[in-house]
Amino acid sequence: MPAIDQNRLEEFLGKAVGDIGAAMSAALVLVGDRLGLYKALGVTPMTSLELATRTGTSERMVREWLLNQAAGGYIRYDIASKKYSMSPEQAFALADETSPAFLPGAFEIIQSIMRDEPKVTEAFKTGRGVPWGAHDSCLFCGTERFFGPNYRGNLVATWIPALDNMDARLKAGAAVADVGCGHGISTLLMAKAFPLSKFTGLDLHPASIECARKRAAEGGLPNVSFEVADATNFASPQGGFDLIACFDCLHDMGDPAGCAAHVRRSLRTNGIWMIVEPNAADRVEENFNPVGRLFSAASTMICVPAALAQGTSSPALGACAGPAKLKEVVTKAGFTKFRVATTTAFNLVIEARP
């Protein structure tokens, strides 16, 4: 065994302790979200007793939760008043569900990952993957709550306007398919913003489609429908769709090439395929950063297993596919135009045209 460098060992152990503390504290974020502790603390500074009284919880439990959250930098503590509070930025990310930076949904996904670890570990042995629908239900709700704020902040305001003339076409009335729509957050946002257009949300997961239909009924949106359908053979209207969108799902598919080919067949001659994917780099080493760590963790536990569950011969693109691999899939299907229309820190928004 090579000699141990004590300084390097201590440096690594310090990093690991930070990760262990963060991992253990993830459950406490869920506690704060579900009990309304963040929302209450975001209004005014409070002691543990005041917060417990406001939220109908145990003061002793709240006291320990506050200590953890302050130690992690998720809330603030004032020594003079002995009260805890949240900065506007902390409240924006943890207490405001309308915020584009709202984070608790990510922690629901973490909860599902931990619960599903035995299934994924088995997939390492067999290579057969884990179907999307076989995951803990926290994944489905967490995905909606995690991606929803980003879609609300960007989809209608910046992503669609970045596509060639698509904003005007949707305002005038167009046919749109949202493939891999999940609970339908992206579909419903577009349907509300463009009432003259018709939107169809499509997903393989029946429970997600059922949830999406309930959301549509609650919203009273007459121009949207949801169907259980495969990305490689969904139905299209006569003449084809003006816009087909895939939000954060192409890399999860067992047959992304089959999806691309079917999208190509299902579009009008002047139609657009909007592909929103993780903003990963093409070169492996360029993903060795906090965002790449997040993408690859989700990809290992969710995305690649989902693709492999649809067939072990799947290319299983994964969340770190990068634009070059995505372009290869798209152009091989017959698309002649491929461009990154816009980006965020976490997203590539791609426009593909026949």
Image (cartoon, rainbow, N blue to C red):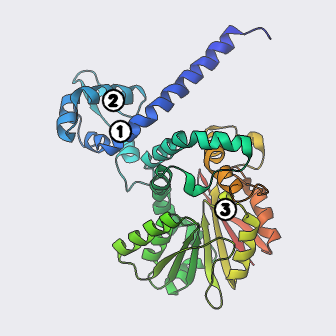
Q: Which mark is residue 65?
A: 2
Residue 77 screen position, x and y as percent: 31, 27
- Left or right of 250? Residue 3 is right
Q: Which mark is residue 68?
A: none
- Label whose residue precedes the other's in the sequence (1 or 2): 1
For the C terminus, which image quadrant?
bottom right
User: What is the distance, in whole Å, between disc 1 and disc 2 at their CAs?
Assistant: 9 Å
- Left or right of 212? Residue 87 is left
User: Image point 68% across, 57% down: which residue?
Assistant: 251
- Label whose residue precedes the other's in the sequence (2 or 3): 2
- Closer-to-camera residue (292/216): 216
Residue 300 screen position, x and y as percent: 66, 44
User: Image point 65% across, 39% down: which residue?
Assistant: 121
- Cβ atoms at labels 1 and 2 below 8 Å apart: yes
Crowd around label 3: few <14 · some 14–19 · many ≥20 (10 Å): many
**Would residue 111 be visible to someone looking at this image?**
yes
User: Image point 35% across, 50% down: which residue?
Assistant: 96
Instruction: Report helix, strand or loop for mark 1.
Output: helix
Residue 107 lies, with reference to residue 262, above or below; the image says above
Say which quarter of the image contains residue 337.
Answer: bottom right
Kindly identify which residue carries mark 1: 31
- Closer-to-camera residue (77/116): 116
Kindly identify which residue carries mark 3: 250
| Residue that extends furthest to the bottom in the rendered view of this protein | 238
Say which quarter of the image contains residue 54.
Answer: top left
**Would residue 279 be visible to someone looking at this image?**
no
Residue 257 lies, with reference to residue 143, above or below; the image says below
User: What is the distance, in whole Å, between disc 2 and disc 3 at their CAs?
Assistant: 39 Å
User: What is the distance, in whole Å, between disc 1 and disc 3 at their CAs?
Assistant: 33 Å
Amino acid type assigned to the residue bearing label 2 in the image: Trp
